[in-house]
Image (cartoon, helix red, strand yellow):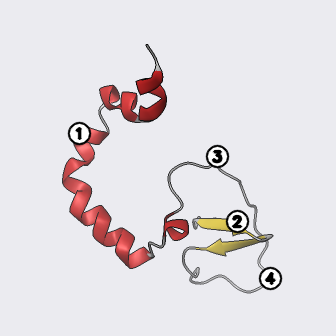
């Protein structure tokens, strides 16, 4: 059986985003570290409920944000410094 659950590695431990159902203690796991991306919302004082509210409120803009030409704004400050 394979089951995928997202989590965060912090202080030598993996914190799972949810408790897996039907998985016994001492079950073997394989952890794959993904390249860091995005913003650590917890570091900015935003909890899961607030993140859900923001995602819902800003969801209408997602289609525009995901357009390839919007990549120019990914590092806006660096792009602005270029002549």
Residue 4 locus on image (x, y percent): 59, 64
SS assignment at label 2: strand
Left or right of 77? Residue 2 is right
Question: Sequence order check: which comes first, mark 2 or mark 3?
Answer: 2
Q: Which residue is mark 4?
A: 26
The residue at 37%/33% (across/down) is 73
Question: Sequence order check: which comes first, mark 2 or mark 4?
Answer: 2
Q: State which mark lies toward you, 2 or 4.
A: 2
The label shown at residue 24 is none
The residue at 49%/29% (across/down) is 78
Q: Which residue is mark 1?
A: 64
Asked whether 1 or 65 is in front, the reply is 65
Q: Which residue is mark 3?
A: 35
**Cα separation between marks 1 and 4:** 45 Å
Question: Sequence order check: which comes first, mark 1 or mark 4?
Answer: 4
**Does residue 75 appear in the picture of this structure?**
no
Label 4 crowding class (10 Å Cα cut-off): few <14, some 14-19, many 20+?
few
**Cα separation between marks 2 and 4:** 19 Å
**Cα separation between marks 3 and 4:** 27 Å
SS assignment at label 4: loop
The residue at 72%/69% (across/down) is 10
Quadrant assignment, res 15: bottom right
Q: State which mark lies toward you, 3 or 4.
A: 3
> Which quadrant of the rendered structure holds the C terminus?
top left
- Seen in the picture, residue 79 relative to 2 is either above or below; the reply is above
SS assignment at label 3: loop
Q: Which residue is mark 2?
A: 9
- Seen in the picture, residue 77 relative to 2 is either above or below; the reply is above
Quadrant assignment, res 58: bottom left
């Amino acid at each position: 059986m394979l089951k995928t659950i997202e989590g965060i590695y912090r202080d030598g431990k993996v914190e799972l985003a949810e408790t897996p159902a039907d998985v016994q203690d001492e079950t073997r796991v394989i952890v794959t570290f993904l390249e860091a991306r995005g913003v650590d919302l917890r570091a900015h004082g935003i909890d899961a409920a607030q993140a859900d509210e923001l995602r819902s409120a800003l969801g209408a803009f997602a289609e525009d944000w995901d357009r390839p030409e919007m990549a120019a704004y990914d590092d806006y400050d660096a792009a602005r410094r270029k002549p």
